[in-house]
Image (spheres, helix red, strand yellow):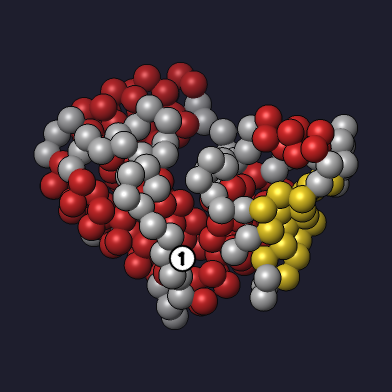
Amino acid sequence: MTRHALSERLLLCDELDRLGPDAPTMCEGWATGDLAAHLYVREHRPDLAAGVLLPFLSGRLEREQRRLAHGDHAALVQRVRGGAPAWNPMALPKVDELANLVEYFVHHEDVRRAQPDWRPRDLDPRLQAALWSALRRTARLMFRRSATGIVLIAEGHGRYAAKLPDEHGTVVLRGTPAELVLYAYGRTSVARVELEGDADDVAALHDAELGLG
């Protein structure tokens, strides 16, 4: 099987090594060191990762991520590069591809697109197809807070109705699967997506909080 998640992981780690711990990212409040710490905790410390959902654990999570982010950056990136430990189901290639493709693709672009000299990548069509499949699985969750209807159109891949209209009409989003993924996961300021709809509906979509947050 083609392991796009692994490829994105390794490319992201190359960028983290190149930039060091203090470069900006598209994740608000996080430099590259903070992002590396997040990725490590997500796979190696599920006892802390639960702090994302459980408020009483959030303090421990933040303290440990801060400690890791200010430690040995090269060693931390190397641990992320090595993947999940054997006891974690994400160490299995099929689980890794399912659970980590979007995670590592989006965070790779979070690092790339926060740099002043970034340029779009010419992505493998197979990666675009995999991202389109992943987006179709999660789009309803990502756009759940939108007051507008959402139709996603990726030329050569198809269309997907991600949400029915609510307070407003429908907005059509056109772009490659990669750019639509970035938009759906809240990277709206850097995603190269065309929006089609009434001005009020487009404005309402701009005001919506997208993604998992």
Left or right of residue 32: residue 175: right
Q: Secondary structure at mark 1?
A: helix
Q: From what the image shows, is residue 206 above or below residue 123? A: above
Reading the image, the residue beneath label 1 is 97
Q: Nearer the viewer, residue 123 or 9?
A: 123
Evaluate whether residue 108 shows in this view: no
Left or right of residue 145: residue 70: left
Q: State the image quarter where residue 144 is shown.
A: top right
Residue 16, horizontal then vertical, whole percent: 24, 49
Q: Residue at x 35, y 67 (%)?
A: 7
Q: From what the image shows, is residue 155 above or below residue 36? A: below
Q: Residue at x 52, y 31 (%)?
A: 53
Q: Nearer the viewer, residue 37 or 45?
A: 37
Residue 96, horizontal then vertical, whole percent: 42, 62
Residue 64, horizontal then vertical, whole percent: 27, 28
Q: Nearer the viewer, residue 21 or 40?
A: 21
Q: Residue at x 52, y 76 (%)?
A: 125
Which quarter shows the N terminus? bottom left
Evaluate whether residue 72 shows in this view: yes
Q: From what the image shows, is residue 107 above or below residue 127? A: above
Q: Residue at x 38, y 27 (%)?
A: 29
Count of number-bearing discs: 1
Residue 199, horizontal then vertical, whole percent: 80, 38
Residue found farthest to the bottom: 1
Left or right of residue 210: residue 11: left
- Residue type at numbered disc 1: Glu
